[in-house]
Amino acid sequence: MTIRKTKHSDIEKVMQIYAFAQNFMIQTGNPEQWWTVHPPEKLIKSDIERGLSYVCVNEQEIVAVFYFNIEIDPTYGKIDGSWLNDDEYGIVHRIASNRSVKGAGEHCMNWCFKQCRNLRIDTHADNVPMKKLLEKLGYTYCGIIWIENGDERLAYQKVE
């Protein structure tokens, strides 16, 4: 599997992966994280234009997509708990796979950690598959943050 920046020509496949992920979350007891309208195509196109959207490709097929950047995320400014450090960090958002290749999500997360050895990510309390993946990869639960609409998310961090 390889990681590359998402191209505008990938948008249809990327949105199919997000639709699959939305349905998977609903089926696995997590209907409220993305509903059926998140992430909107306009946001993904913006991510692509800014060079912050990436895809995981296996044998010429896009099998996963995610947002990665080294930036200050305003939603991480307030936490009920504490981050492992206050150093510069990378963030991962909107990670999704079509589950056609085992380990695609893990591959994406490991790639991100190679880019920045101080990563933060958040997920919905009901997103059991993501929580299991983060635990498997050695992420530490740091507390609760609130996203823009006021919903709570579980915050995790991994440092070298």
Image (cartoon, rainbow, N blue to C red):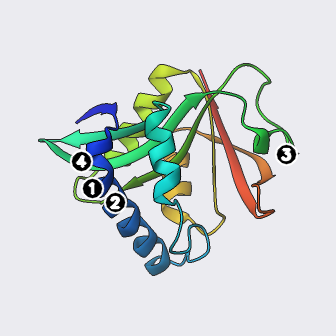
Q: Earlier in the sequence, mark 4 or mark 3?
A: 4
At mark 4, the secondary structure is strand
Q: Earlier in the sequence, mark 3 or mark 2?
A: 2
Q: Earlier in the sequence, mark 1 or mark 3?
A: 1
At mark 2, the secondary structure is helix
Q: Earlier in the sequence, mark 4 or mark 2?
A: 2
Q: Quadrant of the N terminus?
A: top left
Judging depth in this view, the residue of 141 and 46 nearest the camera is 46
Label 1 close to label 3 by CB (< 8 Å): no
At mark 1, the secondary structure is helix
> Image quadrant of residue 30?
bottom right
User: From this viewpoint, is residue 79 visible?
Assistant: yes
Q: Residue at x 67, y 43 (%)?
A: 156
Label 4 close to label 1 by CB (< 8 Å): yes
Q: Earlier in the sequence, mark 4 or mark 1?
A: 1
Q: What amino acid is labelled 4 in the image?
A: Ile
Task: Point out which mark residue 62 bears.
Answer: 4
Label 4 close to label 3 by CB (< 8 Å): no
Side of 103 where 46 appears, left or right? right
Per the model, the C-alpha gap separating discs 2 and 1 is 6 Å
Q: Residue at x 76, y 64 (%)?
A: 151
User: From this viewpoint, is residue 103 visible?
Assistant: no
Picture coordinates of residue 3 (x, y %)? 31, 32
Residue assigned mark 1: 13
Per the model, the C-alpha gap separating discs 3 and 2 is 30 Å
Label 2 close to label 1 by CB (< 8 Å): yes
Label 4 close to label 2 by CB (< 8 Å): yes
Dot in front, 3 or 2: 2
Per the model, the C-alpha gap separating discs 1 and 3 is 35 Å
Side of 139 where 104 appears, left or right? left
Q: Residues within 10 Å of mark 3 (few under 14, many from 20)?
A: some
